[in-house]
Image (cartoon, rainbow, N blue to C red):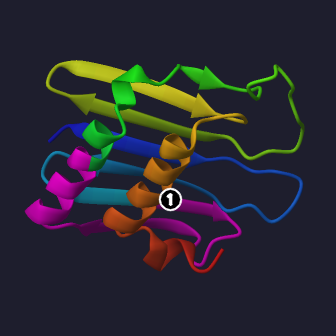
Amino acid sequence: MRPIITIKRGGCFGACPVYSAVVYSDGTVEFEGRYFVEVIGKRSHKISDEQLKKLISAFKEADYFEFKKKYEVDENGESITDQPTTTTSFNYNGKRKQVVDYYGSPKKLIDLQNKIDELAGLSQYIGDR
């Protein structure tokens, strides 16, 4: 069993959800909630093969391996403070990539991050945001 997808959402000066999750090749999902989430601590569940396929497809459709390694300024080179950092990774077919998103990332990366929460079943632990 190897990890194929990870997501880690960091904090901000407000009530940003802080948690991490790992999705393994057999569909096992390990979640750890830290702050401003419904479930604090570790939880584990399994997603169906169909859900896992949808997750992998979401990464392919987003062209994950084409994203920059780090986003921290907008298209004009401007930065901003107090943004939560979201770090994702994808390990597929012998390729591995990690993307750090602080600010200025494309919409399709943000959409992918939200799809991870949805398709991996993390919403049950995160709660309403």
Q: Nearer the viewer, residue 7 or 118?
A: 118
Image spot of residue 35 (x, y percent):
70, 64
Image spot of residue 107 (x, y percent):
56, 45
Residue 12 appears in the rendering: yes
Image spot of residue 13 (x, y percent):
89, 53
Image spot of residue 105 (x, y percent):
62, 35
Q: Quadrant of residue 40?
A: bottom right
Q: Nearer the viewer, residue 52 or 22?
A: 52
Residue appearing at x 57%, y 63% in the figure: 33
Name the side, left or right, on which 33 lies relative to 118.
right
The amino acid type found where label 1 is placed reads: Glu
Answer whether residue 77 is magenta in the image: no
Q: Quadrant of residue 47?
A: bottom left
Name the side, left or right, on which 14 lies relative to 90.
right
Q: Residue furthest front?
A: 76
Residue 4 appears in the rendering: no
Residue appearing at x 40%, y 67% in the figure: 118
Note whether 89 is above or below 120 in the view shown: above
Position of the N terminus by quadrant: top left
Residue appearing at x 14%, y 25% in the figure: 93
Position of the C terminus by quadrant: bottom right
Note whether 50 is above or below 56 in the view shown: below
Answer whether residue 36 is magenta in the image: yes
Note whether 110 is above or below 29 in the view shown: above
Report which residue position mark 1 lands on. 32
| Count of number-bearing discs | 1
Secondary structure beneath label 1: strand
Q: What stretch of residues is rendered in magenta?
A: 31-57
Residue neighbourhood size for the residue with mark 1, other residues' Cα within 10 Å, grouped as few (<14), some (14–19), many (≥20): many
Name the side, left or right, on which 87 lies relative to 13.
left
